[in-house]
Amino acid sequence: MKYCLIALAACLGLIGAARANEPVDHAMVGKIRQEAFHRSQVMQTLSQLTEDVGPRLTNSPGMAKANAWARERMTGWGLANVHDEAFGPFGRGWEFRTASVEVLAPRPFPLHALPKAWTPGTAGPVEGEAMAITLKTQADLDKHRGKLRGKILFLDAAREYKPGEKPDSNRYNDHELDELRDFTIPKDRDPAKRAKDAKERLDEIALTAATNAFLAEEGVLATVSISSWDNGIIRLGGGGSRKAGESVGVPALTMMAEHYNTVMRALERKQAMRLRVNVDARFTGDTDEMGYNTIAEIPGHGSLKDEVVIIGAHLDSWHAGTGAADNGAGVAVMMEAMRILKATGAKPRRTIRIALWGGEEQGLLGSTDYVSRHYGGWPEPTDPQQKKLPMSLREPTGPMQRKRGYDTVAAYFNYDNGGGRIRGIYTQENTAVAPIFADWLAPLNDVGATTVTHRNTGSTDHIPFDRIGLPGFQFVQDRLDYFSNVHHSHLDTLDHIVPEDLKQSAAVVATFAWHAAMREQKLPRMPVREP
């Protein structure tokens, strides 16, 4: 028994020694905190991006302006190798200026709606009768052929209003952070379901193309869909088509639910509703064009200078608001982290690179292209149908092909869950990084960054890195009102940002980037998850 206790004590001592061996540069963290908390420029950066540049739909004039603005600002801070890098081809550019919908009869009043991206304008005001219709199958199209000219189609059923039962804005409490540390063992994937999902997605793509062509041929004036959120929030994305040569259909709008329901109730009463629609929207090109990521660096020094630590956020946004939370906040935080490091006179061993991605909202396109060009990926499928699918639904093409830069990546850190402050980080099941991250968070525990969870999180630009076995991570962030008011909505504006949260986040990111750039070894990697 005595020897068992001695052995146990020795093991515990070794674990403690292993934990203690992860160096934390407290002097540098102190400099980062001072710069981040007392000389911050993060809100100035975000204000310029959202209120001077504005919304940034990929390949729109606004996105081109944002790329140029980011290059100019980071060059002014003294960052190196500032440039844009093409990805794609992405498709056509698009922008809109104004949109209005009015009821003319039986009594005049306005309806609040905004156009979906990549749908045409009306070329001036148009007037027509509202009509409720279902167009969910090819049979639906055939049934209405020759009956829709001059109509304004309402495509969704009315939806019962449900008052919110939770606060609009949320922060993690201690109990929720504790729960976040619990890992749920996943169930086996069902290959049949994956095949079914792929077929349904291909059917949806085919029906969308057929519907766009049908609506234009039939002379429909416009279509209207219901917003997915209540309380006057217009939440929308894309429609039509950004691909050259494909039909863009007719002007397509998303309407706030309460106004949409008003029209539907009138139509259910068999009451004629005459509307006027005016959408000033245009495509900015008639060919498929490249999209662009914006890149800049703080060069490394010494024997590790050719290795990289990358921090990133997506620069593109949807067009309804100004993209402040999604993802102007992430852009401002990552740019501020680079400014902070530069201001402290940091000379990292590894190069620290910032990547501001395009095309995230259309499927992580900018980051996926960048990773596949520089670091590796799976061969592109040759089947045209497979190419239409997102990567998660494609048939495996393996084996993974590594590029020359694969072994140079020490870490990738991403910020893209609104403007809430960082509360911790997801390890993506990479258990070896947990004690490292816990040590790096320790000098920032007092500002709320405490939690390391082995859970996976998806739908952000760390996924292309993680997918090929590179250590890519997304931070845990307070939710605020991201998923209740602002996500992809016209309310995504600067008013919903908390300056102190962005200051804290920039300090955390700068701390992580610095330590990843200075540690003796690259961060531990997970085995590649073959498809």
Image (cartoon, rainbow, N blue to C red):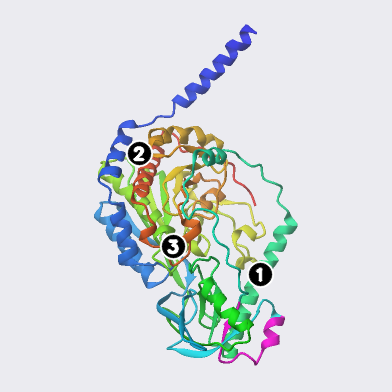
Circle 2 is placed at which residue position?
Answer: 349
Looking at the rendered structure, the kind of residue marked 3 is Gly
Residue under the point 54% across and 55% down = 459
Residue under the point 38% across and 65% down = 322
Q: Identify whether 154 is placed above or below 404.
A: below
Across and down, in percent, residue 321 comes to: 41, 67
- Is the residue marked by circle 3 packed among few (<14), some (14-19), or many (20+) residues within 10 Å? many
Toward the top, the furthest residue is: 2
Label 2 vs label 3: CA separation?
A: 28 Å
Q: Is residue 471 left or right of residue 68?
A: right
For the residues bearing labels 1 and 3, Cβ distance under 8 angstroms: no
Query: What range of the chain is rendered magenta?
Result: 139-155
Q: Is residue 431 left or right of residue 298?
A: right
| Foreground residue among 23 and 488 | 488
Across and down, in percent, residue 133 comes to: 64, 81
Find out whether residue 59 is within the magenta segment: no
Q: Is residue 132 visible?
A: no
Residue under the point 55% across and 49% down = 457
Task: Kindly state the secondary structure of the residue where label 2 is placed.
Answer: loop
Circle 3 is placed at which residue position?
Answer: 358
Specify the quadrant of the image occupied by residue 358. bottom left
Find out whether residue 143 is within the magenta segment: yes
- Is the residue marked by circle 2 packed among few (<14), some (14-19), or many (20+) residues within 10 Å? many
- Is the residue marked by circle 1 packed among few (<14), some (14-19), or many (20+) residues within 10 Å? some
Across and down, in percent, residue 87 comes to: 46, 64
Q: Is residue 429 left or right of residue 333?
A: right
| Foreground residue among 500 and 95 | 500
Circle 1 is placed at which residue position?
Answer: 202
| Foreground residue among 283 and 276 | 276
Q: Is residue 94 left or right of residue 381?
A: left
